[in-house]
Image (cartoon, helix red, strand yellow):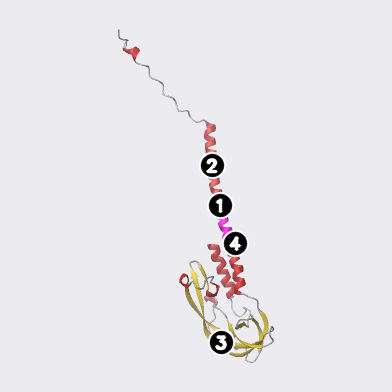
Amino acid sequence: MDAPEEMLTSPPQPSPSTPTPTKREMERSRSRRRCGCVMRRFLQLLTVVICMAASLVIGVFAFVGGSSIATPGLLRARCKIISSSVDIRSAKVCEVGLLRYEAEHLFYPSERRKFRCRHDYYWASVFEVEYIDYASGRTKFALAEAPDEALPVDCRPTFGVAWSLKNNFKLNRTYDCWYTPGFPKVNIYRDNFFRCQPVDHFHTKMLKRYLIL
């Protein structure tokens, strides 16, 4: 005998209810998210600080290294002016990307294809002088130029300024000068004839560009 239909049909099973997160669990989740955001920002800030510190260290080493190359030991002497004139001079300037520096400061001068170079032209007072070398006691002849390298454009001397500077040094008179043993040129001025100094200008630019990098 068949069972009644209502007895054969099983009653519907209740669906399991999804547990709702409690208030404490929600606060913990928000706290973890906040901690994650703070940690990410801290790591980003730490990365920026490390990059800036590395750039500063590189810039300081470049500044000190360039100073030791650009300004070797100078000896003081008394130079006698033999002849004087005004002539145009040129300085080779090379640049790589953001870095710009004079050709004598290149680390790899043989690899010319990597450097974009140009020539800066400027007027200079040129003197032929004689002085006594303290090491050997002999009289030596050399050239002195003022300025002895290309100054920034805003304070680069014109022909008239170079001519006036030439007339400040009289023929057959002696003046203080500085020379480096083994070099064919001497300095008869100490960066006080112009409104800027070429060495300081160069190293300032180098330091700024290293900091930018």
Picture coordinates of residue 16, whole percent (x, y) = 43, 24
How far apart marks 4 and 2 lie (CA) works out to 35 Å
Label 1, residues with CA under 10 Å away: few <14, some 14-19, many ≥20: few
Give residue 34's mark: 2
Viewer-closest of 202 and 113: 113
Q: Name the residue under label 4.
A: 57
Q: What element carries label 4?
A: helix
Q: Which amino acid does label 4 sit on?
A: Val
Viewer-closest of 194 and 67: 67
How far apart marks 3 and 2 lie (CA) works out to 71 Å
Task: Give the mark nearest the N terminus, 3 or 2.
Answer: 2
Give the side of residue 130 with respect to residue 93, left or right: right
Confirm or deny contact between disc 3 and disc 2 (CB under 8 A). no
- Which of discs 4 and 2 lies nearer the camera? The answer is 4
Give residue 45's mark: 1
Q: What residue type is labelled 2?
A: Arg
Is residue 51 located in the magenta-colored stretch of the structure?
Answer: yes
Q: Is mark 1 on a helix, strand or loop?
A: helix
Confirm or deny contact between disc 1 and disc 4 (CB under 8 A). no
